Image: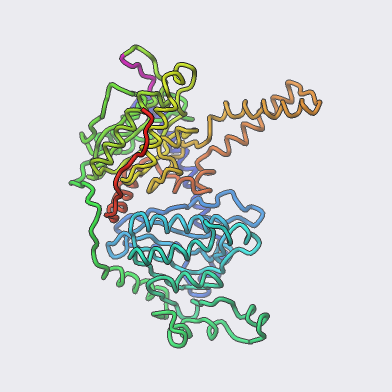
Amino acid sequence: MSLEQNKNEDAMKLAYSQVRQRLEKIYEGGGKKSIEKQKERNKLTARERITYLCDSDKPFVEIGAFAGFGMYEEQGGCPAGGTVSGVGYISGRQCVIVANDQTVKAGAWFPITGKKNLRMQEIAIENKLPIIYLVDSAGVFLPMQDEIFPDKEHFGRIFFNNARISAMGITQIAAVMGACVAGGAYLPIMSDETLMVEGNGSIYLAGPYLVKAAIGEDIDNETLGGADTHTSISGIADYKFETEHACLDHIKKTISKLGESENAGFSKIESLDPKKNGDEIYSVLSEGNIKPYNVLDIIDCITDADSFDEFKEDYGKTIVCGYGRIEGWAVGIVANQRLIVKNKKGEMQLGGVIYNDSADKAARFIMNCNQKKIPLVFLQDVTGFMVGSRSEHSGIIKDGAKLVNAVANSVVPKITIVIGNSYGAGNYAMCGKAYGPRFIYAWPSAKIAVMGGEQAAKTLLQIQVAAMKSKGKEVSAEEEKKLLDEIIDRYNMQTTPYYAAARLWVDDIIDPKDTRKLIAEGIAAANHNKDIAEFKTGVFQV
């Protein structure tokens, strides 16, 4: 390994160590005191429940750990969006698991909590995976009810999805291990089976205090909506258990009895180790991602040895396309090439930029993968489409639209990894969040924005200065420099992977070394859904 590669490796590992440090804080949920209160009530934490429920010899892929990161500071924060969730294995079966974290504001739903729960239901629907709800929530966070309650993608959509998931024949199991209040009470009852833990689990539309205020009735928590009440009087719950462990054991037994369904049939053979050592993936990108690199070095770190066959190798070189295998799964890879390349006409092309020929090639390759029923993997490090009169006259918008159309209408599963830049229309063309990837992850080096920081800051500065001058205020060079620095700092903060992950634009910020494993787990999940629509692209401008 060269000195430069050593520097690259150190920088990437340092960047991920910062991710880990922040995750350790997030894993504390509402803090040590809140966790102690859970223990005093003989309750496990959300993370402990998931650890006990899932198979220890299989991976648990957490989704949305950074949800809410840096948000809601006036309300004291909302670590992980008040919910721990992901895709794991229960009795050998891949499942979606959603667990309210009672240590975070009593498990109350913030706006990001709703978005995260909807994301988990989306994963269950798209991949036909059983979904397990571990319920322990006080309901909507009332001070922000206007941002979580009434809209289409708000709290009520959860129960809409409950009904749809059930109609699709996807198993839903709800274990009520704490409070389940108000509208939230519908979630377990709209699941296939409802389990309750005695002494802690409770389900009711209105709690004792509200009942007293509304109708003057004095009643305690257990009599109103405890496990005994709902399994022997109302009949809305199906099982009760003395302990959480017994409750979780029952879920394991139930999942072990589920019948097998026909899968999608994506090609899988015996896995081979990659050509390159897994650790070499850290050494490819430079610190700050400011230098060109060969994306084939990353592809060699994640694909099975000698499995990658490049498509149209000598054409449209700023996007690398090809067929390969990842842990035995057949994949089609679409990756931005960051090297400066020269086409057959002798023209130089900048790495990370999409040109007419590369857009054309990628669109054709995506259509091929849909024809062959091969899942797609996008490796994003894109600054956008080429601009200027030469590109415009050559029809870059037409060719870009062709690529966007192919991505949007693709029916095979898509998995996106944001390695570096993800700017503007390049984000769309390379299957950003808006284009429906089954899973989307970011490296610590990722930057997601409408354009690069320097260009955006100068544009914003021009607008701001013009507005000040129109009001008769003169702006000195010093003031202009100060404004520019403020704009750059603010804009750069908004382009970080933390900002994106906090808002669930990406599912997680990952260790680059885990890229191969997460892609394979994503395809394994997608393989459960045999229903693949007919591929149609509509009208192409050619």
At 49% from the left edge and 80% from the top edge, which residue is drawn? 199
Is 45 on the left or on the right of 330, as rendered? right
Which range is magenta? 339-344
Please name the predominant secondary structure of the magenta segment in the image: loop
The quarter of the picture where residue 398 lies is top left
Give yes or no for residue 343 being in the magenta stretch. yes
Extreme residue in the left direction:
270
At 64% from the left edge and 79% from the top edge, which residue is drawn? 209
The quarter of the picture where residue 99 lies is bottom left
Classify the position of the C terminus by image quarter: top left
Q: How many marks?
A: 0
Question: Which residue is nearer to you in this view: 14 or 106?
Answer: 106
Residue 357, percent from left and from top:
35, 23
Residue 394, percent from left and from top:
41, 19
Question: Which residue is nearer to you in this view: 125 or 70?
Answer: 125
Classify the position of the N terminus by image quarter: top left
Residue 18, percent from left and from top:
50, 43
At 69% from the left edge and 24% from the top edge, which residue is drawn? 481
Question: Which residue is nearer to you in this view: 341 or 79?
Answer: 341
Extreme residue in the front direction:
539
Extreme residue in the right direction:
472
Q: Is residue 317 above or below residue 202?
A: above
Residue 149, percent from left and from top:
58, 62
The quarter of the picture where residue 221 lies is bottom right
Question: Which residue is nearer to you in this view: 192 or 174?
Answer: 192
Give yes or no for residue 201 being in the magenta stretch. no
Q: Is residue 202 above or below residue 151?
A: below
